[in-house]
Amino acid sequence: MDTPKRRLRFGQFMSEQQGQWRTGDPLALSRAVLACSYDHRRLPRWLRDAILTLVDRSMTEAERRAYRELEKHRTRWRMVRELRRRSPKPLAWEKCWPEAAKRLEHGASFGSADAVKKSYSLIQQAGGERCTLESYRLAVRKNAKHKGGNGPG
């Protein structure tokens, strides 16, 4: 039961964890996440930001580049899926690629219709919605091996 006393204790605990995180204790994040989970509360903004900071610090520049590439292909894949699903009459594949490219032209995932088509195929090969960085890397290697190139653009 959520009582004023319980809310106060939870707030004090979270404040303590935030202070401990700021002084360099990474385990404060796990304690705070567990407390939120146990109390069925949303993560506070400071905790979400701290987790993102911790993850970012743990990644190499090569990993960041790989995730940016993956996200570019995923964004193109999602746009194609949206065009195919949300239209009253789903767009034909041939019309889908240029329409997706057009809708993405001002973003980081911009690419030609051919690039959108290749990205869609790549993410499908990597598991679609279940695509992970590892499955993406395997699909890129497989495509490069079969085509003798560097994969999609």
Image (spheres, rainbow, N blue to C red):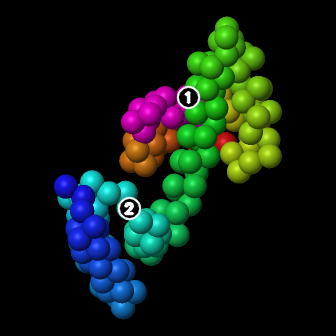
Kind of residue at disc 1: Ser
Q: Which residue is mark 2?
A: 43
The residue located at (48%, 62%) in the rendering is 63
Nearer to the camera, 146 or 25: 25
Which tag, 2 or 1, sits closer to the chain's start? 2
Specify whether residue 138 is in view.
no
Helix, strand or loop at label 2? It is loop
Q: Are marks 2 and 1 in contact (CB under 8 Å)?
A: no
Nearer to the camera, 131 or 81: 81
Kind of residue at disc 2: Leu
* Residue 132 image-quadrant placement: top left
Can you say whether 17 is above or below 36 in the image?
A: below
For mark 1, does the 10 Å Cα neighbourhood hold few (<14), some (14 to 19), or many (20 or more) residues? some
124 within the magenta span:
yes
Q: Position of residue 106 (x, y in %)?
A: 80, 46
The C terminus appears in which quarter of the rendering? top right
Classify residue 120 as left or right of residue 54: right
